[in-house]
Image (cartoon, rainbow, N blue to C red):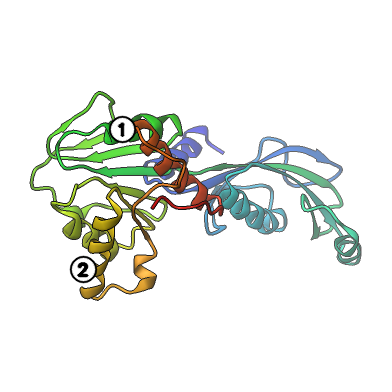
Amino acid sequence: MKVTDFAHYVNKLIEERKPFAVATVVKIEGSSLGKPGFKSIIDANGNIIYGTLGGVCPESAISYYAVEAIKSNQPKLIKVFLEETEKSLKSSLKSTSEDEVHVETFCGGVMHIYIEPYVPPRRLIIIGQGGKDDVEDNLIKLGKILDFEVIVIDHKPILTEEPDMLITDLNFELEKFNFQSNDAVIVLTKGDRDILVLTTLLNKNVPFIGLVASSKRAEHNINILKEKGFTDEQLSRLHTPVGIDIGAITPAEIALSILAEIISLRSGKHYPHKK
């Protein structure tokens, strides 16, 4: 394996913001075609993009674990037993470890394979209305602390915090923005462009849309969106007033409550919603 080729594929996947895993043989016992240092790059669908672990047998088994590692964003150390068919079947039935796999082959050895996932950082996209907004500023600050990639779309912001990307084009067409499956979008349009922005986001299937608004404005907007034909299922992606109920009062606390809701939903937790 050429180091330059390996780096090329890794960098390409990172630039394209595609999740992947690198599986590396770290140790072998007995006979194995794969040797320590053999690597494979595996995409989120279990396809081997580059490299080898020493043959189809271990690679087919490791692809499953690579996909699971990507989903959980947690590394795994897998022990692969290369055994004859009868022994492999018996061992599989007896095994209670999730980190062991028994593969049918005549090699007879054992491979220890470390799987390291690479998942692009989740993006926090803030749509502002221009001018000074302390909630916007605190969302940028806290979002970066929490390892979000923070993108601000605001034609004339007054910021003390610097986002990872700032789009200030007055005529920026939101429908042309490349939203992704793990984006969280916070809308700070303060009523002026609520419906226009929310309509675009709902049509783009953004998974988490948070509107900062009073309960009265939130209800008013939802009623308009229903009149426009959006279903309850579509509107379930709209969280407004966004933020879990922590008794937030200050802009920093409001930003914290918003990010807490995003994180809690990602983790499958449900806490009382701000009213």
Q: Position of residue 218 (x, y in %)?
A: 28, 57
Marks 2 & 1, CB-CB < 8 Å contact: no
Q: Secondary structure at mark 1?
A: loop
Q: In the depicted view, which residue is nearer to us: 53 or 166?
A: 166
Image spot of residue 11 (x, y percent): 42, 38
Which residue is rendered at x = 29% and y = 63% of the image?
202
How many other residues sit within 10 Å of disc 2, few (<14), some (14-19) or many (≥20)? Answer: few
Q: Does residue 32 appear to the left or right of 264 in the view shown?
A: right
Q: Which mark is residue 224?
A: 2
Residue beneath the point at 13% across and 51% down: 192
Percent from the top left, x then y, of residue 133?
22, 34
For marks 2 and 1, the one nearer the N-term is 1
Secondary structure at badge 2 equals: helix
Callout 2 amino acid = Ile
Q: Residues within 10 Å of mark 1 (few under 14, many from 20)?
A: some
Q: Which mark is residue 21?
A: none
Which residue is tagged 1?
A: 164
Q: Would residue 154 be found to the left or right of residue 21 on screen?
A: left
Distance from Cα at disc 2 to Cα at disc 1: 33 Å
Residue under the image location 38 percent in, 61 percent down: 237
Q: Residue most toward the left?
A: 171
Residue at image position (78%, 45%) is 111
Measured as percent of width and height from the top left, residue 21 is found at 56, 45
Above or below for 230 versus 185: below
The quarter of the displayed image where residue 235 is located: bottom left
With 7 as the anchor, is 93 left or right in this view? Answer: right
**Residue 130 shows in the view:** yes
Left or right, residue 209 beside residue 18: left
Q: Is residue 121 visible?
A: no
Of 81 and 131, nearer the camera is 131
